[in-house]
Image (tube, helix red, strand yellow):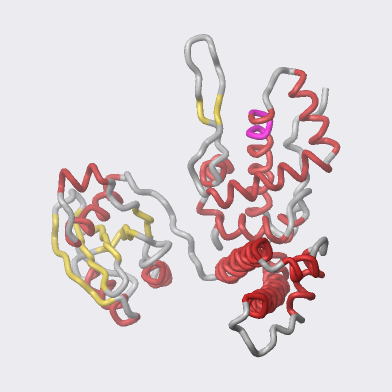
Amino acid sequence: MTSMTHDGPKITGGVDTHGLTHHAAVIDSVGRHLADREFPATVRGYRDLLDWMRSHGRLSAVGVEGTGAYGAELARVLTAAGVAVVDVDRPDRRTRRMKGKSDPIDAYAAAMAVLSGRATGIPKSRDGVVEAVRVLRIARRSAVKARTQTMNQIRGLLVTAPAMLREQVAGLDRAVLIRTLARLRPGDDLSRPLAATRAALRRLARRHQALDDEITELDAEIGPLVKQAAPALLELFGVGPETAGQLLASAGDNPERMRSEGAFAHLAGVAPIPASSGRTHRHRLNRGGDRAANNALHTIVLVRMRYDERTRAYVARRTKEGLSRRDITRCLKRFVAREVYRALTTTPIERITQTDLAPAA
């Protein structure tokens, strides 16, 4: 077992992560390069990397590139060993053109980013129920995309299908259409276009049915996990299992890493950005951040604008004040982000109340 305490000078580590290997480096308290070394990206390799770093002194923190990809398991191992892990962005193209590119250079750069304070991000822990929700949602998203593609292919085939077949399914809604096509009998002679088209449509329809079943199963698995992870989030108006699952995945198992609701707003790309010039004073939508989280907030706002009386009154009042629909939507997304942050960081005993929306005049 790796020792938790070490004597010696204070050092900072940096790691450039890859699929099969990780390159580590250590620097002292004034940024001098001490050593660098490559380790295999295995359980034993992670432990050897930590032991090697600690052999150079008291390890204060480690900057890891790609904590959401190749460095995810290394970040978990280091955190479990009591080491402070900092998420480090990869150097931009301009920096790489000036300083060059190699594994040792990137590892030292990660360590320097931590020591200088340029990198301060706390990575997602990826060790709880939210991580389970995230990985299951990947499978669900893939199934939904494949089902949409399958339906588009069915409609494309029907456009050029023989008239006899088109007339047989004309006017059917999607559910009945899929059931009808799944029962088609193409016959044995697939050299005829009509028989081949029937065979293709039957296969596509049955694939659509299988994807429907897969999505239903995933929804049944994801729903209870979302409720377990953040019951307060599901209590908010307009928040369903799908949007809640995405917001949870964006926040991670340790939402406390976001130091304020403003930080969450930046993460979700809903922090307003000044866009003033001369006598014009305004803000615009932030097009950065996690776009999937931004889309989830947008969906919640659309639901509220249609069904929530308080939101409808707010929209009417702000419209009279001269705000465009886009600006009103930006404001509402910011309000919803505040409520979502409180729901994600609240304890089960506390209850979330929607008090952020300005009352109608």
- In the image, residue 206 lies at what x, y percent? 69, 78
Picture layout, residue 148 above or below residue 188: above
Which residue corresponds to the image point at 68% horizontal and 71% vertical from the top-left?
Answer: 215
- In the image, residue 335 lies at what x, y percent? 68, 38
- In the image, residue 344 lies at what x, y percent? 64, 54
- In the image, residue 298 lies at what x, y percent? 66, 44
Find residue 254 and report its image quarter. Answer: bottom right
| Whether residue 102 can be seen here | yes
* Residue stretch rendered in magenta on the structure: 327-331
Secondary structure mostly seen in magenta is helix
Which residue corresponds to the image point at 32% horizontal and 57% vertical from the top-left?
Answer: 63
Find residue 250 and report its image quarter. Answer: bottom right
Quarter of the figure with the C terminus: top right
The one of 157 and 269 positioned closer to us in this rendering: 157
The one of 263 and 275 positioned closer to us in this rendering: 275
Q: Residue 231 vs residue 94: left or right?
A: right
The one of 185 and 308 positioned closer to us in this rendering: 185
Which residue corresponds to the image point at 74% horizontal and 24% vertical from the top-left?
Answer: 318
Picture layout, residue 35 above or below residue 185: above
The one of 145 and 2 positioned closer to us in this rendering: 145
Q: Residue 133 vs residue 92: left or right?
A: right
